[in-house]
Amino acid sequence: MHCPFCKNSDTKVIDTRISEDGYSIRRRRECQVCGNRFTTVETTQLLVMKRSGSIEPFDRAKVVA
């Protein structure tokens, strides 16, 4: 992760928490060079690989139907 202040790629994770909705992770990071702290929000997107080899986003409606 790059520091938004000095653009250095050397950062350290200080704290990790799951967000209230449960679908994302909030990480508190500190730049090892300038010492500034910033928060990142990381989410994942579920993808489905079809038998044909194509990849598409997961659609819950297709599973329930």
Image (cartoon, rainbow, N blue to C red):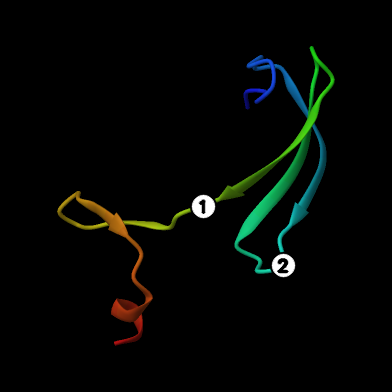
- Give the CA distance from mark 2 to mark 1: 15 Å
Displayed quadrant of residue 59: bottom left
Relative to the observer, which residue lies in front, 63 or 5? 5
Q: Which residue is mark 1?
A: 44
Residue under the image location 62 percent in, 23 percent down? 2
Q: Which residue is mark 2?
A: 20
Horizontal side of residue 60 vs 65, given as left or right? right
Residue under the image location 80 percent in, 15 percent down? 34
Horizontal side of residue 30 vs 53, given as left or right? right
Q: Residue 44 location, x and y as percent?
A: 51, 52
Image disc number at residue 30: none
Asked whether the residues under the numbered discs 2 and 1 touch, taking CB atoms below 8 Å apart as contact, a structural biologist would say no
Amino acid type assigned to the residue bearing label 1 in the image: Thr
Residue under the image location 65 percent in, 69 percent down? 21
Instruction: Identify the residue at the far left of this view.
Output: 52
Q: Residue 36 location, x and y as percent?
A: 81, 25
Amino acid type assigned to the residue bearing label 2 in the image: Glu
**Circle 2 sits in a helix, a strand or a loop, which is it?**
loop
Q: Residue 11 location, x and y as percent?
A: 74, 23
